[in-house]
Image: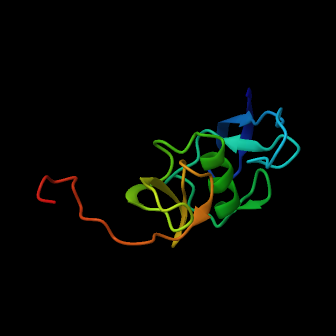
């Protein structure tokens, strides 16, 4: 990925961005056929519904972040079963009720609620 910076009007500061690479394989692409910007400073500090820098809804930027493999630390993660592939995975929340599954690359809703194992009580 090519990294650069852009000015964010919401934060009134320069943010780090990366441009995704073009798909180099046949088959279904996980991103659009042209490079897309991915905000490396995306996360809780973005209080708006639409990115003013790239003019895309927050959900779209979250999807681009997740599909570029950059969701860790930027998106909420919940261990759940993907309704698309059926695997239990660390699903990344891109919007209320919409989760990105890194195992299959689909955006789906949770299939079932799994026990919370984070506090050891299961």
Q: Which quarter of the figure has residue 79?
A: bottom left
Which one is in front, 36 or 43?
A: 36
* Residue at left offset 79%, top offset 33%: 21
Residue 12 visible in the shown view: no
Give the quarter of the image for residue 107: bottom right
The quadrant of the picture occupied by the N terminus is top right
Between 15 and 66, the one lying in front of the other is 66
> In this view, which residue lies farthest toward the right?
34
With 117 as the anchor, is 19 left or right in this view? right
| Residue positioned 16% across, 54% down in the render | 119
**Figure quadrant of residue 10:** bottom right
- Specify whether residue 50 is in view: yes
**How many marks are shown on the rendered structure?**
0
Closer to the camera in the image, 8 or 118: 118
- Snapshot colouring: rainbow
Which residue lies at the image location 62% right of the left edge and 55% below the top edge? 62
Residue at image coords 53%, 50%: 43
Residues 118 and 24: in front is: 24
The quarter of the picture where the C terminus appears is bottom left
Q: Where residue 4 sits in the image (x, y, percent)?
A: 74, 29
Image coords of residue 52 (percent x, y): 75, 56
The x and y percentages for residue 90 are 43, 51
The residue furthest left is 121
Give the percent coordinates (x, y) of residue 47.
56, 61
Question: Going by the image, does 34 lie left or right of 107?
Answer: right
């Amino acid at each position: 990925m090519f990294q650069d910076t852009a000015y964010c009007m919401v934060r009134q500061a320069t943010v780090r961005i990366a441009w995704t690479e073009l798909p180099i394989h046949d088959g279904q692409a996980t991103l659009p056929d042209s490079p897309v910007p991915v905000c490396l400073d995306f996360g809780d500090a973005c209080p708006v519904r639409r990115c003013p820098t790239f003019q895309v809804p927050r959900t779209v930027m979250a999807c681009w972040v997740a599909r570029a493999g950059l969701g860790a630390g930027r998106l909420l993660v919940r261990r759940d079963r993907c309704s698309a592939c059926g695997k239990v995975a660390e699903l990344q929340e891109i919007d209320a009720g919409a989760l990105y599954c890194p195992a299959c690359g689909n955006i789906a809703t949770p299939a079932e609620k799994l026990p919370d194992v984070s506090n050891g009580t299961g």
